[in-house]
Image: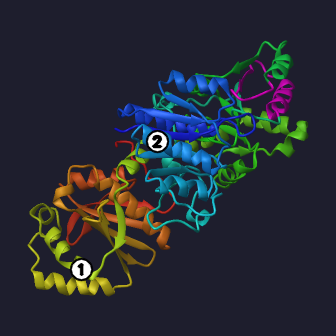
Amino acid sequence: MKPLIIRADASPNIGTGHVMRCLALAEAWQDRGGDVIFISACDAPAINNRIKNEGFSTYPLLREAGNPADAEDTARIAHKHCADWIVVDGYQFGAAYQKKIKDSGLSLLFIDDYGHADHYYADIVLNQNNYANMSFYKNYEPYTRFLLGTRYVLLRREFLKWSGWHREIPDVARKILVTLGGGDPDNVTLKIVKALKTIEMDGLEVKVVVGGANPHFDLLSETVKDLSNFTLIKNADTMPELMAWADIAISGGGSTCWELAFMGVPSIVVPIAENQELIAKELRSKNIAEIVEIADLKNRKNFVKLLRNFLKSSDIRSSFSKKMAHSNDGEGTSWIINAMCSNTITLRKVNPSDCKKIWLWINDPVVRSVSFHPKPIPREDHVTWFSSALRDPNRVYFIAEDKNAQPIGQVRFQIEFKQAVISVLLDPKYRGLSLGSILIRDATEKVFLETELEKINAYIKIGNETSRTAFKKAGYRELGLSVNNGENAYHLIKTRGINEFNDSI
């Protein structure tokens, strides 16, 4: 694989979250055999050291972050290293920055949280948050693809090693992890520590993680120096182990939420920045975590009461833990890199000139063998059907194309009320390239974005294990057997807004 360029910054004010989530993508790229180069204005020595210790190269930023000269330097470094892709993560990067990168002939993955740019020129826009939807993105290029939601959570390899781990929920929680992110400029951590000091409970243990860009370590250290049950940890490099140790966590509302979710940690979330409010709001609406606003911390008595109830309520903690653990499957980085590597695939509406090639595709012997109507389809019958299909308002019909605009397959949705049945096939020349699940996923997401469909059904002929696996990998959930066209078939579904992950994939 060619080198990957990552452009992200860290500091006490902006925190370390942008760089840390990019590290997850960098590790996954490295695991596939590619080099990674970070270009960064990083006012956090611990983060710089971690980047280097992971085996990634670094370039210090010599320009004002986010301005045209920054974009020009970034593009120049990418071309110097023969890279195709640049990853950009940060609120200082807007539409002009994206356009500068694209105009240089490079591909761009733009990591976003709330649609802060006026226009999106990126090839791929990634928003890994639970609230992500197309309402944030009004202006973008025809080629721009969107990866939205917790399916695409960026988890570092240190977390992925814990996949499948089972959490025990004690009757009374006594192990508390406090982690307010890499920066915490307003020292919200101190307010929480002072509240925890007032809780009298046998066996209570508190571990406080102080991020690499947090300027308040000395004050926090002074506050807990005489408390034997408090441990202060600076620049923690064992976060999964700490989360596995904890019975509960008190966390900021940033990317750490998705790490805690993966580890199934019952959590009290304190959004410490405006951009964290949306995550907290969605967690509250889904009853996945307890939410405490910074203003609520001023009333220490009420906060301590909430903490005591949370520590003693095993049913609530168990419910939170299960819901959090099912919010992502840990495959986010794989999906993202697959999307980058297959970014040559685009979807367009079918048109009359596609009639012949589709007829050839559907009469391919392999396609006929897995069809519910296995006999070859005469040309005349196909032309009549195809003409009707183009006029049918209840049919959404896409052709998939490669980077040279060559058709590689089709995806069709037949709509009835707010449900649809999906049908998909690839040109024989493109089989065996792991494109099936990507095509199914992209088309499914596109039709959910562009219609009001609530559910999509897939019916697969028994014995067609290739399609069955592709649909599962694309996030469809298997319901069992169902009768389709007079014979039993595997029935799989994808529901709007729900990640139907299958543990067997």
For label 2, count other residues whose C-alpha is less than 10 Å away and answer few (under 14), some (14-19) or many (20+): many
How did the renderer colour the structure?
Answer: rainbow
Q: Residue at x 74, y 34 (%)?
A: 12
Name the residue located 46 percent from the left edge and 41 percent from the top edge. 78
- Determine whether 421 is above or below 264 in the image: below
Which of the labelled discs sits on residue 45, or is there none?
Answer: none
User: Where, by quadrant of the figure, is residue 49 drawn?
Assistant: top right
SS for callout 1: helix
Q: Is residue 270 magenta?
A: no
Q: Which residues are magenta?
A: 187-216
- Tell us which disc is closer to us: 1 or 2: 2
359 left or right of 133 in image: left
Determine which residue is flagged by label 2: 78
Tell me if residue 260 can be seen: no
Which element type, helix, strand or loop, lies under badge 2? helix
Q: Is 117 or 378 nearer to us in this picture?
A: 117
Q: Position of residue 390 (x, y in %)?
A: 30, 83
Closest to the observer: 69 or 112? Answer: 69
Looking at the picture, does residue 328 appear above or below residue 391?
Answer: above
**Amino acid carrying mark 2 in the image:** Ala
- Residue receiving disc 1: 353
Q: Is residue 162 visible?
A: yes
Tell me if residue 336 comes above or below residue 439 in the rendering.
Answer: above
Q: Amino acid at mark 1?
A: Ser
**Does residue 284 lie above or below 310 as drawn?**
below
Q: Who comes first in sequence, dot 1 or dot 2?
A: 2
In x, y percent, where is residue 99?
Answer: 54, 58
